[in-house]
Amino acid sequence: MQPIIIVLVVGVIAVLLLDTIGSFASRRFGFNYGSLRVLSWVLRIGTGFFAARYGSLSLSALIGGLVAFIDATLGWYVSWIIGPGRPKRPISPKLIGRIVLRVTLTGSALSFVGGLLAR
């Protein structure tokens, strides 16, 4: 398997584990689930770092964006089902789309920073 694919798969697994374990821990211990955002940023930077080691800076941004997109969709769904990711008030599909886009772009940018650190 190509190293860059391994970086993508490990990044996706890591964010989904963070969402799942973090959601259960947030419910159990009562801390703000949003505080795990910093760990997500570290994962994005790390993904970009390793993607750039095995590819290019642009590839690090792409891989990081993909990992962030999975986190903002499937990861949010997991945390929504478990409880802490569920919004307190109803939100429109348009707002959900904007949130997913913002998380994806931020993840791509953070991964690019990680790529710069690798260079």
Image: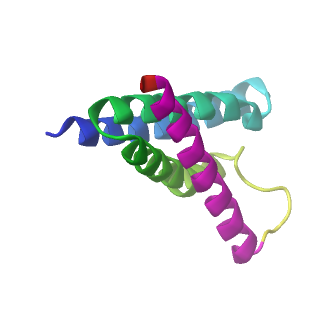
Q: Quadrant of residue 28?
A: top right
Report the magenta residues as a range: 92-117
Across and down, in percent, residue 15 comes to 50, 38
Quadrant where the N terminus is found in the figure: top left
Residue 77 falls within the magenta-colored stretch: no
How was the colour assigned to the protein in this rendering?
A: rainbow
- On whether residue 111 falls in the magenta region, the answer is yes
Residue that sits furthest to the right in the current view = 89
Quarter of the image holding residue 7? Answer: top left
Where in the figure is residue 109, as x and y percent of width and height? 58, 45
Q: Residue at x 63, y 62 (%)?
A: 101
- Seen in the picture, residue 4 relative to 29 is either above or below; the reply is below
Relative image position of residue 72 (x, y in whole percent):
58, 53
Q: Identify the residue at image location x=49%, y=24%.
A: 117
In the image, is residue 66 above or below residue 101? Answer: above
Residue closer to the observer: 54 or 104: 54
Residue 59 spot, x, y in % from top left: 37, 46
The quadrant of the image that shows the C terminus is top left
